Image (cartoon, rainbow, N blue to C red):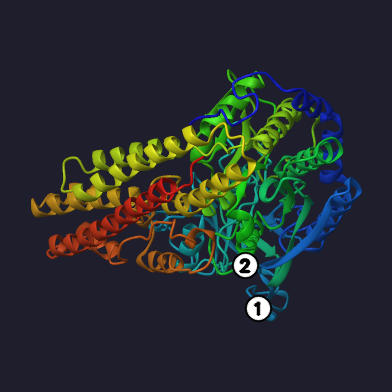
Amino acid sequence: MLLAGLPNAGGQLSPTESRILSALDSDRTIALTRRLSEELVKNDSGAGAGSAIAGSADERLLAGFIEAEMTRMGLEVRRESFPVHAYDYGKVLLRAAGKQLPAITQHSGAGTWGTAERVPYRKGNTSGGQRLRTALVDAGEGWVHDYADLSEVRGRAVLVRRGADWLNSQVVMEAAEQGASAILLYDYDGGAEAPQDSIQQMSIVYRDPIPTVTISNRDAAWLKERLAEGEVMIELENRVDFDYGVSENVIGMIRGREYPDEWIIVSAHHDRWWQGAQDNSVGVAVMLELARVISEGYRPRRSFLFIAFGSEEVGGLWTQFDWLAGSHAFIRAHPEITSRLAYAFNLDIAGWTGREGRVYATLDQVAFQRELLADLGLDERVTVREHVSTGVDAWSLGGVRGGAVAYLSWTGDVPYSRYYHTQHDVYRAEDYANLQHDLRHGALGVLRMDQAVVLPVGFSEIADWVTEQLERIEQTLSALSAPTELLRDARQAAERLRTQGERLAAASSPVADGDHAAVVNALMMRTRHDLVPWLLTTQQRLRGSRHAEDLAALQRARIAATDENTAAALRALEQVNTMQWGKRVSPATYRAERLLSYEPTGWMWEFDQHPRPIGPELHAIYSQLGAGRGSNSVTEIAKLEAQAEGSLREALFIVGGKLQEAARALAEAPLP
């Protein structure tokens, strides 16, 4: 990618850049972090004390504070509301063997009582159905085989270790299918050094069927000791009210003086679990500090938006993946902004004390980010990764709407994951050693992009990534039949995109004519906007990658079944998408979870970016083979194989076609 259109590309900081960067105040930002985390929200929510969640009064309180801060800076401020699923969690009462244990309700888990869209429900067996009193059994990690040796589960509560799985929807469904009346979860992925009293809040999926609460590892170990001695009785009461509500995005704007309809965004989410010092009070504080220095000491060429997104953690409607609700609402409401999004810097968990950092950037921004890091003297500490995660709002802006997006993350001896979504995510002054780097990286990125004559849209970087991904697909299918003609067509289209992107960059940079530059920039932003979402999946891979892996696994399974090698056939089927977890659940749980995969709404369905699984009969074929009743298995596997190949062919057709359209659009660009 050519960076000649950028001021000081590959050089030192300009006087303007030095002045703005020197005005950044990390002490001020840290103080604001503490205020956001400790002083504004005071509650004892059953989802975690201090939480400010989708549609709640506490989330609105934070939005109002941010609005006031932006208004004081002189920004044009507005609050945009959007509908969400809203939950209200009463404090959890949990007693076991006569001892009261700290616990929270897992988001979207049912309570023992409450209302669901204003319809009362009761799942208890005492106190008018509000409280549950029952025996506890240890169900291991909660998979179907963990229940095989349990003599009695129906009507009892189960203790389940979360294991390495994040959402845990399957284990909650399995517990309900086994007849359990409640589930107590413990353990999480915070690592061996995570505090043993940590209680982590994590989404499951909405509409969970039984009361679901989380306890600490320490209390789980105590319960296991009591269970080894004999029966343990528990009492559980947790109210959960569920309804529709309203969340808000808070947006502050500085109108650009030359290109007012080209946009630069700095964003962070203001909702949180527990006190959320790192996730994400510090992100909001950094966003506000960048807004302060830009508004006080700089007149931008392009329009700036400083956005505090609501409902990043949860709140999305009618989808099991309900996070990123605020940023998704924004991109749905503002196509005129997202189609002309020059650059976005997203903040989520900023400044963490660690030795090494990573910048995660969209496909076309890798070279630009490396230049920033070099000029900041961070290139030996920070590497650049060419993708953004579906766990942060950057995904909505970059993955779903094809804008240029980046965010910075730090790792070290004490990783933030040990505190993630727990009561230990609180203000500690020693946690912000890298905050000045986040501030400087964010400020320099938006300044460089604002001053660029021709925007650094790296179509050659996109082409390189696509070519690499296509090679991986071909390797996956190397020993099997593959749609070679579609792979060839997509590879050729990627090369045409590279050629046209380099031609346009060479002809347009540097450009003296500002009007012509505006036309070229509009074309490049529109082309990126129309292309990138069609290439990506939610796993940050090329469309078709998952289908290729499924096809390869099914072909191996069919060959093994033909040879009557049942063990090899089962191992191959276990590599197919849904069977990686489906092998561990009952047929009824598999059906229930698979039904959720058809949910029509949410950011992952915007461009069908979450690969649709192959037919639900897969589980039955696997079960029959395992039980020695697979006489028809070769024929049935062959049907699924044909389905996977059809999905792969369609995906490669889309990839090749969209690359071709993008190359054609760039070829028709007016040159100076």
Q: Can see residue 574?
A: no
Q: CA distance from mark 1 to mark 2?
A: 10 Å
**Nearest to the observer: residue 285 or residue 579:** 285
User: Would you name the residue on which mark 2 appears?
Assistant: 110
Residue 21: x and y, percent? 78, 27
Q: Residue at x 55, y 29 (%)?
A: 3
Q: For this view, does 22 lie left or right of residue 338?
A: right
**Nearest to the observer: residue 188 or residue 434:** 434
Secondary element at image label 1: strand
CA neighbours of label 2 inside 10 A, class few (<14), some (14 to 19), many (20+): many
Residue 5: x and y, percent? 58, 31
Secondary element at image label 2: loop
Q: Are marks 1 and 2 in contact (CB under 8 Å)?
A: yes
CA neighbours of label 1 inside 10 A, class few (<14), some (14 to 19), many (20+): some
Q: Residue at x 80, y 29 (%)?
A: 20
Q: For this view, does 182 lie left or right of residue 419?
A: left
Residue 46: x and y, percent? 74, 59
Amino acid beneath label 2: Ala
Amino acid beneath label 1: Tyr
Q: Earlier in the sequence, mark 1 or mark 2?
A: 2
User: Would you name the residue on which mark 1 appears?
Assistant: 121
